[in-house]
Image (cartoon, rainbow, N blue to C red):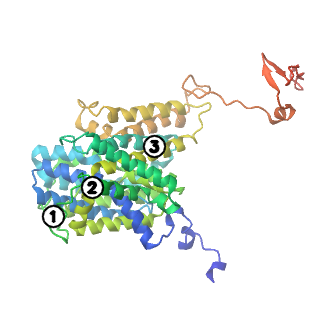
Amino acid sequence: MSRNHAPAPGSQSAEAVRPEDQKLPIGTAFAYGFQHVLTMYGGIIAPPLIIGSAAGLKGPDIALLITSCLFVGGLATLLQTLGVKWFGSQLPLVQGTSFASVATMLAIVSGGGGIQAVFGAVIAASLIGLIVAPFFAKVIHFFPPVVTGVVITTIGLSLTPVAANWALGGNAKAPNYGDPANIGLAGLTLLVIMLLSKLGSAVISRLSILLAIVIGTIVAAFIGMADFSKVGTGAIFELPRPFAFGLPTFEPAAIISMVIVILVILTETTADILAVGEIAGSKIDSKRIANGLRADMLSSAVAPVFNTFTQSAFAQNVGLVAVTGIKSRFAVAAGGGVLVLLGLLPVLGRVVAAVPTPVLGGAGIVLFGTVAASGIRTLSKVDYKDSMNLIIVATSIAFGMVPVINPAFYGHFPAWFQVIFDSGISSAAIMAILLNIVFNVVKRGTPHNPSVFGAAPVRIVPEEVLECLEDGDRCENGKILDKDGNEVPVRAAKGAHGH
């Protein structure tokens, strides 16, 4: 009966028209959510593996770090997607342990602070980030399509080496790294995705990533490339233990270096929020960005209590939203629930961990390429006529790809500089923002008819000219000829000879 009354502005009914508010059947939501988990699983467990090993932790303790990062990542995803007042963008964004902080955390560990100093630095820096998040969100007007398109494109391009590394085997020190069998398994997974996308129904097409990962894993098991022997080893159910490695310590130098990382994470999460908003066709304003950043920082501040590190949005899952076309935040929230479950049930985590890395590599090629394609689509909306937007795009993308192509490019720069510019995403974002300000915000000095860096002017033929032409008419040597080669007389426009 209430359908006869228009919903009040701002009411829940009015908000339900947003693409991300689409409700899905529970089974469907969890299927797509599990697909999100598989997509980001390799990325979310990498930081605890690296940091745990550097800190000298043994197998059971590293397993605890991994379980903790799954549990906290799930809670952070639920907060980001479902949201409460002031916290959560309510967008289909998967949260997890940020890789951006790995280099800084390694420096803290190697400096003698140990993992306790890492936890203390993350807590302190995240609380600072929580304070600055609303102000950071005010800069949204510095993110027009020429900037967001560059950032989204660079996200996809910079993630492509990750897919390549997975396809090669994931561990460069392993004897079978780069084995043709690994590349073949990745290629098989990619082929299955293409076939399911082409030949399957709409549902199968949208689940093509998940189905291809399952099929790839089954094939790997038959040929001896999947190891399930460790699935039954260890506890089946285990509650998270707060401060399992002792209370955090707070070292000023570690905190300062981590604050730089937090600024990088804020930049990348802002880019991810804008990217998924673009893909979903949803309106993104500074308030929504602020809510998303606050959720990021709150999750990061709480994470060390449960033995894990900084949290941020996962760019690869933005690609999955684009590939599947499933924009519902509730599907991603279901994925957050799966992550929490994996954090409480280590045995399920070990099952997911048995998915061969090359299988993830085959899926990653599609996912990360889709992110880049989404950025190119955004860049197609940019006006290049009589502007310097072409040089902004060209310089920013190239600048962002420098550390991706040559990771040692900034090897002799200060550590704080490397933290910022070793990220291709951050490099491209900073360059695009600065150049947009120089050329588009500060108009003074920018030429109206730019040089070779400007796009060629658009040619336009008046419609009335087309109405005068007939089939076979053509232009030769400045004259219009009909189909028989006879010249068509051209009359000068009125006033053409002026005074």
Whether residue 76 is visible, yes or no, is yes
Residue 203 falls left or right of residue 236: right
Q: Residue furthest front?
A: 222
**C-alpha separation, residue under disc 1 versus residue under disc 3:** 40 Å
Q: Amino acid at mark 2?
A: Phe
Position of residue 469 relative to residue 264, above or below, is above
* CA neighbours of label 1 inside 10 A, class few (<14), some (14 to 19), many (20+): some
Q: Tell which circle, 2 or 1, labels the residue nearer the N-terminal end.
A: 2
In terms of depth relative to the viewer, which is nearer, 30 or 357?
357
Picture quadrant of residue 472: top right
**C-alpha separation, residue under disc 2 versus residue under disc 3:** 34 Å
Q: Residue furthest top?
A: 477
Determine contact: label 1, label 3, CB under 8 Å.
no
Residue under pointer 2: 222
Q: Tell which circle, 1 or 3, labels the residue nearer the N-terminal end.
A: 1
Q: Secondary structure at mark 3?
A: helix
Q: Amino acid at mark 3?
A: Ala
Q: Secondary structure at mark 2?
A: helix
**C-alpha separation, residue under disc 2 versus residue under disc 1:** 42 Å
Residue 280 falls left or right of residue 315: right
Q: Position of residue 57 (x, y in %)?
A: 10, 54
Position of residue 235 relative to residue 489, above or below, is below
Determine contact: label 2, label 1, CB under 8 Å.
no
Residue under pointer 3: 372
Looking at the image, how many numbered discs can be counted on the residues? 3
Residue under pointer 1: 243
> Which quadrant of the figure contains the C terminus?
top right
Whether residue 87 is visible, yes or no, is no
